[in-house]
Image: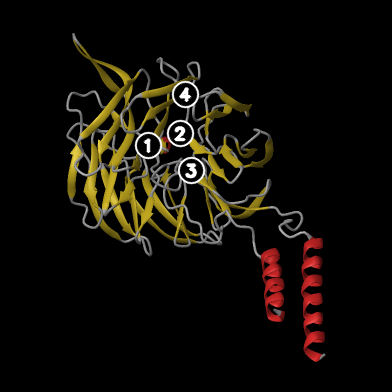
């Protein structure tokens, strides 16, 4: 009985002093691909303070290096791509995630355009990334040495790759501008299967594909609509679902406008933003049943392109070229909140705990529930999605500069109330004293 009371008191003290549960530890969290995982939801359950400050910066130069890549973080390194404006080649960079030191770089062929800088994926000690030289690359993550490359080209076609690949079950999945979607052996680079509609309707496979339930999902742009009187090339896009094992078409859905961003799949729902320059109907956010392709809802952004969404808390978050950041109910597309930050929003949001991070001319932090703008970090144009890993926020500005931000903690987190600590020690002390008295007498 005496020792039981002591044990109870010690357990009480341990409960009070133990860290809060339910959130992932930021010390171990990584972000190895675009939007963190194959769902492309862009969400991690970590507590993030409202304000951020610069920890380190890897400088870019407007006239030399430009980038619209998103950073990925794995194995203590940050990876991204950027185009050198002097030699027009695309470079893959690896930096130390703690201090921004350049560890290695690898030069691919022609860079193409800074609007199409691909985002890498890092899995199993390898960096998988496409380029605009009609090749897809696999590099050693330690030193950047080439392991294998795969030629994506079709004669007479531009075959660049700009989306982060899916790497799962020893397979690499990605699409390219040539109107083909590929599945390769992740170890050797050998072709397992390729998919194309064959009638020209598929168009360019933009953005990062998503993977769920043995299916690969992606959206396209600049395809053609097949009608009774022939194929009309009208720069329209489609949404596709393929069997990941053999590349067989499961379903596809025609959209009036182009998709120039990545898809996201969560809870058997596929979300994708459409629109390019607002020149065709269909701009907005679309939601489908992931298994059947049934259209569940469409949110019209009125001739303004919608960007790649982030999905969390039963909401769909995205930026739009109308200058607004949106939060929609994932069930029915009703507007929960919207906030106008102005200008074209090229960045795609991520959700860190209860915060939304999205760029335009700055990196903005919003309250995910209310849409309140909590803080702004001045950064120049932020063209793509940030990343969160090791308790830091990583993002790239348009001049190719990589920045790492850390939270500003103005006061100790109130995880432990002082009176609880005093109470716990008092209880433990009383129990020990009474136990000693009983033992003595």
| Residue 383 visible within the image | no
Image: 344 above or below 389? above
Mark 2 vs mark 3, foreground winner is: 3
Marks 3 and 1 close (CB-CB < 8 Å) = no
Q: Which residue is labeled 2 in the image?
A: 308
Point out residue 369 in the picture as x, y percentages from the top left corner.
63, 36
Residue 103's label in the rendered image is none
Q: Kindly report the distance in space between the C-alpha atoms of the residues bearing marks 2 and 3.
A: 10 Å
Q: Which residue is labeled 3 in the image?
A: 42
Give the residue at the far top of this rendering: 229
Residue neighbourhood size for the residue with mark 4, other residues' Cα within 10 Å, grouped as few (<14), some (14–19), many (≥20):
many
Q: Earlier in the sequence, mark 4 or mark 3?
A: 3
Pick the residue in front: 402 or 182.
182
Q: Which residue is labeled 1 in the image?
A: 207
Q: Earlier in the sequence, mark 1 or mark 2?
A: 1
Q: Which residue is labeled 4 in the image?
A: 305
Q: Earlier in the sequence, mark 3 or mark 1?
A: 3
Q: Kindly report the distance in space between the C-alpha atoms of the residues bearing marks 4 and 3.
A: 20 Å
Point out residue 139 in the picture as x, y percentages from the top left corner.
32, 57
Structure colour scheme: secondary structure
Judge left or right: residue 355 versus residue 68. Answer: right
Pick the residue in front: 322 or 118.
322
Q: Helix, strand, or loop for circle 1?
A: loop
Q: Kindly report the distance in space between the C-alpha atoms of the residues bearing marks 4 and 1.
A: 15 Å
């Amino acid at each position: 009985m005496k020792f039981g009371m002591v044990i109870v008191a010690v357990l009480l003290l341990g409960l009070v002093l133990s860290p809060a549960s339910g959130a992932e530890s930021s010390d171990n969290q990584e972000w190895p691909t675009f939007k963190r995982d194959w769902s492309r939801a862009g969400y991690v359950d970590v507590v993030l303070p409202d304000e951020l400050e610069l920890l380190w910066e890897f400088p870019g130069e407007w006239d030399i290096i430009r980038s619209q890549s998103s950073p990925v973080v794995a194995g203590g390194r940050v990876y991204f791509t950027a185009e050198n404006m002097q030699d027009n080649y695309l470079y893959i960079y690896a930096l130390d995630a703690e201090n921004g030191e350049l560890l290695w770089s690898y030069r691919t062929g022609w860079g193409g355009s800074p609007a199409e800088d691909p985002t890498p994926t890092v899995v199993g000690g390898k960096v998988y990334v496409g380029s605009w030289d009609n090749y897809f690359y696999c590099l050693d993550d330690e030193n950047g040495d080439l392991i294998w490359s795969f030629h994506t080209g079709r004669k007479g076609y531009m075959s660049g790759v700009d989306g982060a690949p899916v790497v799962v079950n020893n397979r690499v999945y990605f699409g390219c501008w040539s109107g083909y979607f590929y599945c390769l052996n992740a170890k050797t680079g050998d072709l397992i299967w390729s998919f194309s509609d064959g009638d020209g309707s598929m168009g360019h496979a933009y953005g990062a594909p998503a993977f769920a339930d043995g299916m690969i999902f992606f959206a396209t742009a600049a395809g053609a609509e097949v009608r009774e009187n022939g194929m009309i090339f009208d720069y329209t896009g489609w949404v596709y679902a393929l069997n990941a094992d053999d590349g067989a078409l499961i379903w596809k859905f025609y959209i009036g406008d182009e998709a120039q961003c990545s898809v996201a799949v969560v809870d058997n729902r596929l979300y994708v933003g459409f629109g390019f320059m607002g020149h065709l109907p269909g701009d907005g956010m679309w939601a489908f049943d992931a298994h059947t392709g049934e259209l569940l809802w469409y949110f019209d952004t009125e001739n303004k392109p919608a960007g790649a969404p982030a999905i969390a808390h039963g909401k769909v978050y995205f930026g739009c070229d109308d200058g607004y950041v949106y939060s929609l109910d994932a069930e029915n597309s009703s507007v929960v909140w919207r906030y106008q930050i102005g200008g074209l929003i090229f960045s795609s949001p991520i959700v860190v705990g209860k915060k939304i991070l999205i760029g335009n001319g700055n990196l903005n932090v919003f309250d995910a529930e209310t849409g309140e703008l909590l803080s702004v970090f001045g950064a120049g144009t932020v063209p793509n999605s940030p990343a969160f890993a090791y308790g830091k926020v990583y993002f790239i500005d348009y001049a190719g500069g990589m920045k790492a931000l850390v939270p500003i903690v103005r006061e100790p987190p109130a995880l432990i109330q002082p009176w609880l600590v005093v109470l716990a020690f008092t209880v433990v002390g009383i129990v020990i004293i009474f136990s000693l008295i009983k033992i003595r007498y």
